[in-house]
Image (spheres, helix red, strand yellow):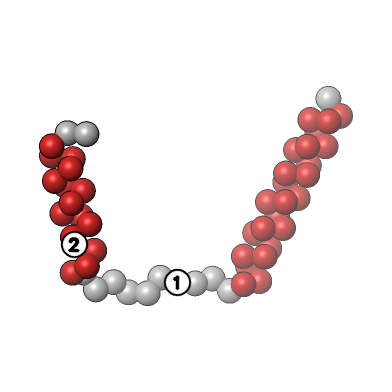
Amino acid sequence: MRKADKLDTEKLAQSQFILVRKPTYVQEEVYQLLRDLSRFYQNLRLRIILFES
């Protein structure tokens, strides 16, 4: 790691204690569930395709 990178990293870390940040947006649980199910479905389809070939 270069010296400048280390200094930049330290300054960035220190700034996190000073800055006042807005709370992040939290998505509704139903959308997280839909995304998880969609990912699961995609993985199943990929496995089926790989298994059949």
Q: Which residue type carries mark 2?
A: Ser
Placement of 37 over or under 9, stated as above or below: below
- Can you give x and y, in whole percent of width and height, for residue 7 in the image? 13, 46
Q: Is residue 1 left or right of residue 7?
A: right
Placement of 1 over or under 28, stated as above or below: above
* Label 2: which secondary element: helix
Please tell me whether mark 1 or mark 2 is closer to you in this view: 2
Residue drawn at 68 percent across, 63 percent down: 34
* Image quadrant where one finds the N terminus: top left
Residue 36 vs residue 7, the one in the foreground: 7
Residue drawn at 45 percent across, 71 percent down: 25
Q: Which residue type carries mark 1?
A: Tyr
Residue 4, quarter of the rendered image: top left
* Image quadrant where one finds the C terminus: top right
User: Mark 1 — residue?
Assistant: 25
Farthest residue toward the top? 53
Residue 31 vs residue 6, the one in the foreground: 6
In terms of sequence position, does the residue under pointer 1 or pointer 2 come before the other?
2
Q: Residues within 10 Å of mark 2 (few under 14, many from 20)?
A: few
Which label was assigned to residue 40?
none
Q: Is residue 45 left or right of residue 16?
A: right
Which label was assigned to residue 15?
2
Q: Is residue 20 left or right of residue 49?
A: left
* Label 1: which secondary element: loop
Residue drawn at 18 percent across, 40 percent down: 5
Residue 36, quarter of the rendered image: bottom right
- Can you give x and y, in whole percent of width and height, for residue 48 in the image? 83, 37
Q: Residues within 10 Å of mark 1 (few under 14, many from 20)?
A: few
Residue 27 vs residue 20, the one in the foreground: 20
Q: Is residue 46 left or right of residue 2?
A: right
